């Protein structure tokens, strides 16, 4: 159906390309949203900042999800979904019945830098089951630098969540996925009431216990990594 978004699970391990046929809708075609979660399609043919793309319903939605990123108007500094792209669908939580109308024109955004960040967490397999984690990260009592990688591991050692810092010390809203045993092959992830284990730049860190639930809700964490630097002087013996 026009203006709707869809979530498709592809069988096997090989990527596939979907060719969608039909008539193109005008960019300003109204899209009716009901209170709660709505799958929406993206009609503009250019990439736009998310606040610009959704300006017609500003203040009337609570959260927007892509396959692996989140925009929360209440947590703009931690939001990882910052633009909307042609050919993608989005899940949006409307706080009331509202009509979305995309702007007829807008300033197109260059998404190249965001794509580079995405590549750092390549290989993570999303599922429809997830919780959201965000918060603060200190390394040696200082805000962690941009580019620091945070991973979440299941009790079986599988990486079920990953984010790369784009702001010093700030862990952006990260999807932590649950297991999907119904897929073929099955997709690893968390099971209900399992404890999350965090790893920063490949090194495990301790934090207050946080249990995984398929709640689609945001949970704040505070991580601190202490790296000890060992200095080994080089001694030269003269002959």
Image: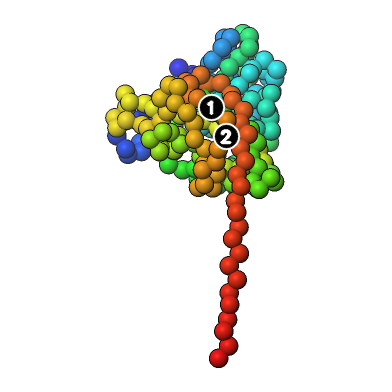
Is residue 193 shown above or below 146?
above
Residue 23 at x, y = what percent? 47, 23
Q: Badges 2 and 1: C-beta atoms under 8 Å apart?
A: yes
Residue 157 at x, y = what percent? 40, 38
* SS category of the residue bearing label 1: loop
Residue 62 at x, y = what percent? 63, 18
Give residue 35's mark.
none
Q: Looking at the rendering, which quadrant does residue 50 occupy?
A: top right
Give whichever of 142, 92 is nearer the camera: 142
Give whichever of 192, 13 is nearer the camera: 192
Q: Where, quadrant-wise, is the N terminus in this rendering?
A: top left
Residue 121 at x, y = what percent? 49, 42
* SS category of the residue bearing label 2: loop
Q: Residue at x 57, y 42 (%)?
A: 164
Residue 20 visible here: no
Residue matched to label 2: 207
Q: Residue at x 58, y 88 (%)?
A: 238
Q: Residue at x 46, y 36 (%)?
A: 153
Residue matched to label 1: 210
């Amino acid at each position: 159906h026009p203006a709707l978004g869809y979530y498709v699970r592809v069988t096997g391990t090989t990527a596939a390309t979907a060719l969608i046929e039909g008539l193109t809708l005008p960019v300003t075609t109204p899209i009716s949203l009901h209170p709660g979660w709505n799958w929406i399609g993206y009609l503009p043919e250019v990439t736009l900042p998310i606040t610009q793309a959704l300006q017609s319903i500003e203040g009337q939605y609570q959260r927007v999800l892509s396959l692996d990123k989140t925009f929360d108007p209440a947590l703009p500094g931690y939001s990882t979904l910052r633009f909307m792209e042609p050919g993608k669908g989005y899940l949006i939580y409307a706080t009331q019945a509202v009509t979305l109308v995309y702007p007829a024109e807008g300033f197109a955004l260059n998404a190249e830098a965001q794509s580079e960040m995405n590549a750092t967490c390549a290989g993570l397999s999303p599922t429809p089951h997830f919780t959201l984690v965000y918060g603060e990260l200190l390394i040696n009592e200082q805000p962690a630098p941009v580019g620091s990688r945070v991973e979440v591991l299941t009790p079986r050692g599988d990486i079920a969540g990953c984010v790369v810092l784009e702001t010093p010390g700030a862990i952006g809203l990260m999807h932590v996925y649950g297991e999907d045993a119904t897929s073929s092959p099955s997709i690893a992830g968390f099971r209900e009431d399992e404890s999350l284990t965090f790893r920063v730049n490949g090194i495990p860190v301790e934090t207050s216990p946080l249990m995984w639930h398929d709640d689609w809700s945001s949970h704040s964490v505070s991580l601190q990594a202490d790296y000890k630097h060992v200095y080994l002087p080089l001694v030269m013996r003269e002959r």
